[in-house]
Image (cartoon, grey):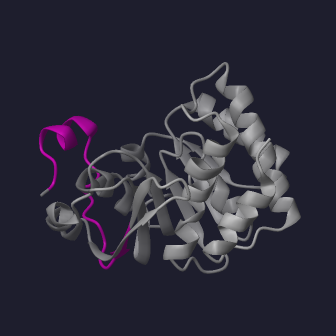
Amino acid sequence: MINKELLKEYSEDFGVNLNGRALDNFDNYADLLVKTNKVMNLTAITEPEQILIKHFVDSLEVLKYDDIHEGASVIDVGTGAGFPGVPLLIARNDLKLTLLDSLSKRLDFLEEVLDTCNLSANLVHSRAEDGGQDMNLRETFDFATARAVAPLNVLCEYCLPFVKVGGHFVALKGSGEETEEAEGAISKLGGEIISKVSYKLPNGDPRSIIIIKKISQTSTQYPRKPKKIAASPLK
């Protein structure tokens, strides 16, 4: 379905070497994504080349811009159709991955993907604000990831509570994200921006990755409920 040699080439450009098994898994993932999308809304991106670039390469860029150590625990918050978490696991099956989403049907799809690819991850059916207050999940992960359109201050309130002190929250964003406006909120949540990188995908689409280090514990008052976050975003 996808051009596996092209995916291998793009990945090698930023230091990720995909073996034959990983490339087959990406191909199977794309096939399941397109087939399932016909009966359930998972993605607006269904052309093989666009899946390769906008989903797979976009997710794998994390491995270029942050040093995720071997055996690291990673939670993908609001994972949706599995991005960036599942591509990271396909490329790095040493990772201890948790996929969190509020919709059980999406998790059913991800379970099928994992079974097909012979991979293992923890699937958690939960809203982010509830998961962030769950003591089994709160401040237990080396890394949290999210690929979402929410403003950075809002996204950090949902995601930083999952990260242990010393760990990183990696936010995958489009272009034009103003990190300065979120610095106060990030500080209140126990974080500090350590890197922001802007780049372009192979098709020219602009992207940015923002890496936030957890430098102190997050107050137990966060994350708040969505209505409170929407009515009074942290500043």
Q: Is 213 part of what is drawn in magenta? A: yes
Q: Is residue 144 visible?
A: yes
Tell me residue 100's x, y (percent).
53, 47
Which segment did they paint magenta?
Answer: 210-234
Q: Position of residue 205 (x, y in %)?
A: 45, 53
Residue beneath the point at 66% across and 44% down: 49
Q: Residue at x 59, y 68 (%)?
A: 73
Horizontal side of 125 relative to 91 (left or right) equals left
46 vs 26, left or right, is left
On screen, 114 above or below 42? below
Residue drawn at (56%, 58%) of the image:
202
Is residue 141 at all visible to an observer of this figure? Answer: no
| Residue that extends furthest to the right in the rendered view of this protein | 20
Judging depth in this view, the residue of 193 and 205 nearest the camera is 205
Quadrant of the image containing the C terminus: bottom left
- On the image, the x and y values in percent for residue 188 come to 18, 66
Q: Residue furthest front?
A: 204
Q: Quadrant of residue 199?
A: bottom left
Q: Is residue 26 magenta?
A: no
Figure quadrant of the N terminus: top right
In this picture, is 46 found above or below 194?
Answer: above
